[in-house]
Amino acid sequence: MKKILVLSFVILLILSVNLLAENPKKPLKSAALSLIIPGGGQFYNESYLKFGFVLALEGSLIGLTAYHHFKSEDYYDKYLATGDEKYYDKYSDYYYKRQNDFWWLGSTVLLSMIDAYVDAHLYNFSSEKKRIRLKFEDQSLLVSFIF
């Protein structure tokens, strides 16, 4: 029973620290920025290296998707004009590449949003971590919290 009380006290203490901590970054805003602007959430969270990587990756995928889209449309127009099957085969190839690009782009955007959301939650983690001290001795647990 004593262990359950101590464990529940520690859990309540940790939850109260999370509620009392003032997080200067808003996680939902960070995720929304990452959805709208490639790397926007990472820039908002001041993770500039991640911002550059996400911007380059998503920009490349957007460019590749556009390229495959225009090539597929071009070959489809040629197929309609001539009726030649080789143009339809090329159209199919570029169409499937474009569909694949959409999946890669969507996955990248989703992971970027998740990363931005988590980074915003952990923005001031190092300063908050210094406020809580846990000390284990023999059969006891000591918790100190600095306000």
Image (tube, rainbow, N blue to C red):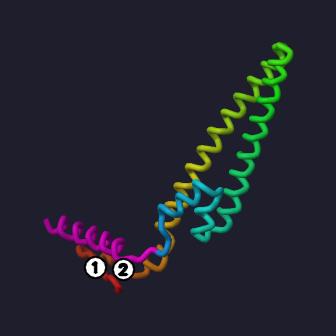
User: Does residue 22 belong to the magenta stretch?
Assistant: yes
Residue receiving disc 1: 142
Q: Residue at x 74, y 23 (%)?
A: 92
Q: Residue at x 51, y 63 (%)?
A: 29
User: Does residue 80 belong to the magenta stretch?
Assistant: no
Helix, strand or loop at mark 1: strand
| Residue 33 pos. (x, y %) | 57, 60
Q: Measured along the vertical axis of the image, is residue 56 above or below residue 64?
A: below
Q: Residue lying at the far bottom in this picture: please name it.
A: 147
Residues drawn in magenta: 1-23
- Specify the principal SS of the magenta part: helix
What amino acid is found at the position of numbered circle 2 in the picture?
Arg
Locate the C terminus and report the quarter of the image it occupies.
bottom left
Question: Quick check: marks 2 and 1 in contact, CB under 8 Å?
Answer: yes
Helix, strand or loop at mark 2: strand
Locate the N terminus and report the quarter of the image it occupies.
bottom left
Q: CA distance from mark 2 to mark 1?
A: 8 Å
Report the front residue among 104 and 83. 83
| Residue 144 pos. (x, y %) | 31, 82
Q: Measured along the vertical axis of the image, is residue 30 above or below residue 139?
A: above
Residue receiving disc 2: 133
| Residue 115 pos. (x, y %) | 55, 58
Q: Residue lying at the far left in this picture: please name it.
A: 1
Total number of numbered labels? 2
Res. 85 mark: none
